[in-house]
Amino acid sequence: MESYVLPLLAVAIGLALLVFRLASKSSSKPSSASAASSRASPDNKVQLDPAGEARYLANQLRPTSTPLDILYAAATSPDMLAITQKHLDLREDVVFKKLEALKKDPNESNVTSMEDLLSDDSGWAEEEDDAATAAAKKAALQKEKEAKQLAAATGKEDVTKLKLEGIDDGVLGAEWVKKQCETLKCWPPPHFQGDLSNPAVERNLLMTMGRLHAKQLNTHPELMKAGPEGNIDRTYFNSTLEFRGRIGQLLEAALKMACTLKCYRLSNSILDAMIMFKIGLMDCTDEKELHWFKDMMLRQYGEGNTPKLIFGEQYLGVPKPPVSSESENDNEKEAKKNEIAAMIAQSKQVTTTDDKMSLEIHVTRQHAESFTKEKLAMCQKQGIPPQIGMQTYKESWFIMVRAKKIGGTLSESDVNYGNDFLAQMKESGHKLYEMLNGETAQAFHEEFEEKNSRDERRLVVAWPFEVKNVAQKAGRVTMNLMPPEEEGRYEFSVIFKSMDFLGVDEEFVLELDVKKGVEKEIVKEEEEDEEEEEEVGDKKNN
């Protein structure tokens, strides 16, 4: 009997010592979880100031701004920096939590329950050819994948398991992008005059340069290998997606400002910045880039099927009567009547006192059929119903119109096409003009002071033109604009700029005679109405 008591007693003493040792270790040294919880994590809220953002952007713009200047202005706006700084703060918190987890005692057992001791994931006793077992494994893996996706979407993902550049081997992130940009000679950012020591400024400009060199980075062997292996620092690459969306919104806001100020040079530069950022290139006028894009389109769609607008009938004059929307079978007479009326309208002389003019252009999309086939093939490959996939298509163009008087120059008194529209904005208290500081306002005034170049630099009207049906072959584009307030012969330059394709912009010229119109006697009619009312009142009193 004694021979059994002693071994049992020794085991009991050993267990007691082990428990005491573990207890003293846990009390003397805080666990990684407790250490991490003692540090307050930053919240994910950012205080934005849309009015301040608009004011900053407006005063960063100049008529002479280059596409890079415009992208730098958008990337360093106050709200953009606030959002990026919050991303950097959140990443720092993730890094801290992961480092705390890595400090965990490697000798500490990962066993947390009796089930852990008994479980065996090696599968040594399972039949390899067991279909049920294989199906169960596949279902378990799918469930695990879905759980990870749900956790990431709801923000409940275990941040300590995120792969981070600088901590996990072979993970690519911001530092890798910077290294590649240095190799491509675009870091530091060319011609940038700001403060790169600010972490948020540095990060935003790095994402800008990374986007402008997307072709080189996305095809880099290291990145192509790291992607499938999951060795991507998502704290950087995920934030680039949000950054791109916000830059796009700021560029659209800048374009509206430039058009309101009637500045052709600035509007043109902003459109160039848009397509540079969308496609991923440093200069949309570079011959090598133009050749690259054209060659890519030819290989994909074939000769005669690449993006191009073909212009047919063009009309500038008094607006045509609207065509009835009734069916053709029931409306042949009405259609003929409207056609005759349109011909009469076209022959009508435009005058300085007309309410508006109409610019109408028949446009054919050379690429409609080839793009439709490509879109259908893509839907089939991805298993997307064509009627749904087709709804996601959007093709954007921007129309800009300038005008100049043939054989003379416009006086500053011409409200519609003259030089005093900025003065009118100032006098009327226009919101955009009130945003401009003195230096910015002066820069735009000087843009239109030189009479010899004024017509080339001033917009008459600008408008977006979108195609949402990829299969649409042809259509008519219509824009309204005010006629000049001075009689004479005018040359109207119409420019179609693509916001999606490179090297496909089109420009043509229309000429128009404008005669002196008869002023409408609105004031006189109002005075006559007032006199009639007074006479009626006198009769009632008598």
Image (cartoon, rainbow, N blue to C red):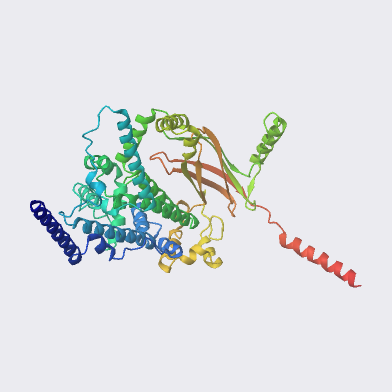
Pick the front one: 81 or 12: 12
* Front one among 459 and 412: 459
* Residue sitting at x 21%, y 64%: 30
Up/down of 506 relative to 191, above or below: above
Query: Where in the figure is residue 433, as x and y percent of width and height?
Result: 49, 64
Q: Residue furthest bottom?
A: 541
Q: Position of residue 350 (x, y in %)?
A: 63, 47
Q: Is residue 474 left or right of residue 502?
A: right
Picture quarter containing residue 475? top right
In the displayed structure, would residue 480 be above or below residue 383? below
Residue 484 in the image: state x and y as whole percent.
58, 52
State the residue lying farthest toward the right.
542
Q: Quadrant of the C terminus?
A: bottom right
- Residue sitting at x 32%, y 46%: 283
Image position of 49 (left or right of 516)? left
Q: How many marks?
A: 0
Spot the residue most to the left. Answer: 3
Viewer-closest of 124 and 101:
124
Q: Is residue 219 visible?
A: no
Evaluate whether residue 68 shows in this view.
yes
Q: Position of residue 394 (x, y in %)?
A: 47, 41
- Front residue (pair 51, 285): 51
